[in-house]
Image: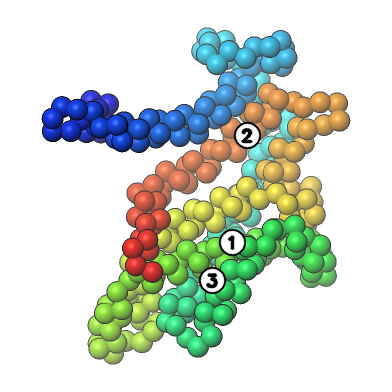
Amino acid sequence: MGVTDRVSSAVDGDGRVSIRSLGVQFLVVGLVAAILLPMYWTFAVSVRSRAEIFAGQRNLLLDVTSLNWDNYANVLFEQGYLDFVLNSLIVATGNTILVMVLAVPAAYAFRLGLRGSKDIFFWILTNRMAPPVVFLLPVFFLVSAMGLNGTYLGLILVYCLFNLPFAIWLLYGIMKAIPPEIDEAVYVDGGNDVDVLLEVIIPLSKPGIAVGGLLVWLFAWNHYVFTILLTSGDTATITNGIAQFFTTVGTAWGQLAAATMITMIPGLVLASLVQRHIVTGLTFGAVKA
């Protein structure tokens, strides 16, 4: 919908402008600006030299003929930031696969309404309600006792503590919205609960599974608290990498901004791949749950 179409939609049959429609459109424009402006300003800082940043060059407008890419070269080739990105890709992708493999059958089991499922469902959600710092020391001692401290597997398993309850909650609402009459059709044909899951639930829940996987991946990608204690130099993630630009002698703002822009790229690529599923997945269980 173009600008002309949006303006036309805000005008009623008598040619009067609908205040409510214009208000909604201004609100949307404001929200988009609030999201994009920090991203643009981060990019603007990332392509300026240290001298320009500390000389008070705060003009929002960029001169495309004088962009400085030294910060990106420094971050990628001298600071070794690509190693942090690779580690985060391994941890986030591994955690997403494990969480979704466990969350799909778990959510389906809760949909079946087995005895005691409501109490178990509430208990699982309480793990997500608690702040991560509450589990910091117990998880550290447990992971260390298992010999997984400083490994990818240790971080992947720990992230399940928070991402798995969220994924189960999200998929449960989506699966609950699927009419039970479809299940009965499978039972009539001689199928069982596993057949219903594979032939009905998973195909109809694909949008929700895609959105759930995206959100879980983003949560694992951005997590910081547990990486402080559970990673070593070889397994440090992007959150550890960004923290290295804050030093006792100052903050490397240009390099920090460049690393931040690089960090956003994988998430944007992944979001674009599942873009067509996002709206459907987030609203699938909104009417019937």
Which amino acid type is marked by label 2?
Thr
Quadrant where the N terminus sits is top left
Residue 236 coordinates in the image, percent (x, y): 73, 48
Q: Could you tell whether 10 is left or right of 123 in the image?
A: left
Give the side of residue 34 with respect to residue 281, left or right.
Answer: right
Of labels 1 and 3, earlier in sequence is 3
Instruction: Report whether residue 105 is seen.
Output: no
User: Between marks 2 and 3, how big is the CA–CA gap?
Assistant: 32 Å
SS state under label 2: helix
Q: Which residue is mark 3?
A: 102
Q: Residue at x 55, y 63 (%)?
A: 166
Q: Amino acid at mark 1?
A: Asn
How far, Cα to Cα, is label 1 from label 2?
23 Å
Q: SS of the residue at dot 3? A: helix
Number of numbered markers? 3
Going from N to C along the chain, the mark reached first, 2 or 3, is: 3
Q: Which residue is mark 2?
A: 260
To which quarter of the image does residue 82 belong?
top right
What residue lies at 37% left-to-right and 57% top-to-bottom?
283
Residue 255 lies, in percent from the top left, at: 69, 27
Q: Label 1: state its secondary structure.
A: helix
The residue to which callout 1 is attached is 163
Q: Tell me the residue at 45%/70% (across/down).
A: 172
